[in-house]
Image: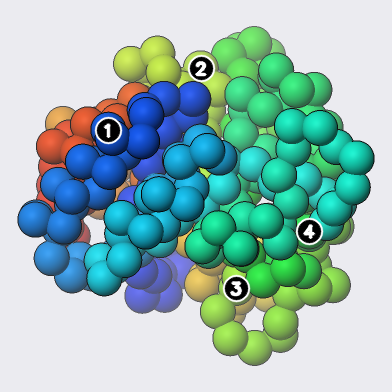
Amino acid sequence: MAGLRAPRRPIFAANWKMNLLRDEAESFCNDLRGALGSPEADVVIFPAAPLLDSVARSIEGLSVMVGGQDVHHESEGAFTGDVSAPQLLDAGCVWALCGHSERRRDHAETDSLVGAKARAALDHGLLPMICLGETQSQRKAGETMDTLSRQLHAVLDAIESSLDEEGEPRFALAYEPVWAIGTGATATPALAQEAHDFLRTRLAERLGTRRASQVRILYGGSAKPGNVAELIAEPDIDGFLVGGASLDSVSFRAIIHNSAAAG
Ligand code: PEP
């Protein structure tokens, strides 16, 4: 399946997690304003929920999108602390992160709940960015591909019927090996490519080759300015979901710049 290379527009996504205050978020956006230009890529910032509104305002006029770090599977109701897809849209979001491993781990999110969240995002007009990835013990036990397959099929079961036959797929995947997140232990390009190729092959079985070739699959896990060029050179790596290195505008910009220079 590698080499099934539609011209996919890369995505650079900043997952700020539970970091930054409003002033810091605004100055990050101002730094982008000075230096980003019009990248041949999509740039997305996922701030914590209280920052969504100010980030959405701060990126006005920039070719940058904003997204929620999580989305509830119901559109409203008695769900204290949660955020719905209509609320994310109302705050200016275009994307919603679904199934990040920290949510799966800390909030006991199951594969089917992740699927329901992605479905809710799509049904309300948001683009879900769906995170998948194996833990260290799953990799050691030789269960990486089974894990990815299970996570992917659960989400496709939930969203397939709401995907358009025509047009670009309204979702993206982020392969994030859990052992690489926040650890400095980045996957090698070959290892990441193997997982991305596997995911694209499974997508092709479900959605057909043409649509599978259009789905953007990001890599996440200790991506930084020094390692993105060799990763994005792989045929099925279509950008990055960046945690730690996205908190500093200089390193986030360098990730975009170094990737573009490699392309
Ligand atoms: C993430 O949490 O999505 C992530 C990729 O984090 P980091 O870049 O810090 O590994």
Q: Is 44 situated left or right of 216 in this image?
A: left
Q: Where is residue 166 in the image (x, y as percent from the top left)?
A: 64, 88
**Residue 217 drawn above or below residue 251:** below
Residue 49 place in picture, x, y as percent: 55, 40
Left or right position of 257 against 16 = left
At label 3, the amino acid type is Pro
Badge 2 or badge 1: first in the primary sequence: 1
Identify the element where label 3 is drawn: loop
**Residue 120 badge:** 4
Q: Which residue is rendered at x = 83% and y = 56% of the image? A: 75
Contact between marks 4 and 2 (CB within 8 A): the answer is: no
Mark 3, residue position: 169
| Colour logic | rainbow
The amino acid type found where label 4 is placed reads: Ala
User: Disc 4 or 2, which lies upstream in sequence?
Assistant: 4
Residue found at x 31% / y 38%? 25
Q: Name the residue under label 1.
A: 24
Looking at the image, is 224 positioned above or below residue 210? above
Between the C-alphas of marks 3 and 2, the distance is 29 Å
State if disc 4 and disc 1 touch (CB < 8 Å): no
Label 1 and label 4: CA atoms lie apart by 31 Å
| Alpha-carbon span between mark 1 and mark 3 | 34 Å
Q: Position of residue 98 (x, y in %)?
A: 65, 44
Mark 1 burial class by Cα count in 10 Å: few <14, some 14-19, many 20+: few
Q: Label 4 to label 2, Cα distance in Å?
A: 29 Å
Name which residue lies at 42% across and 33% down. 16
Which residue is denoted by mark 2 in the rendering? 179
Q: Describe the element under mark 1 as helix, strand or loop.
A: helix
- Which residue corresponds to the image point at 58% horizontal and 86% vertical from the top-left? 167
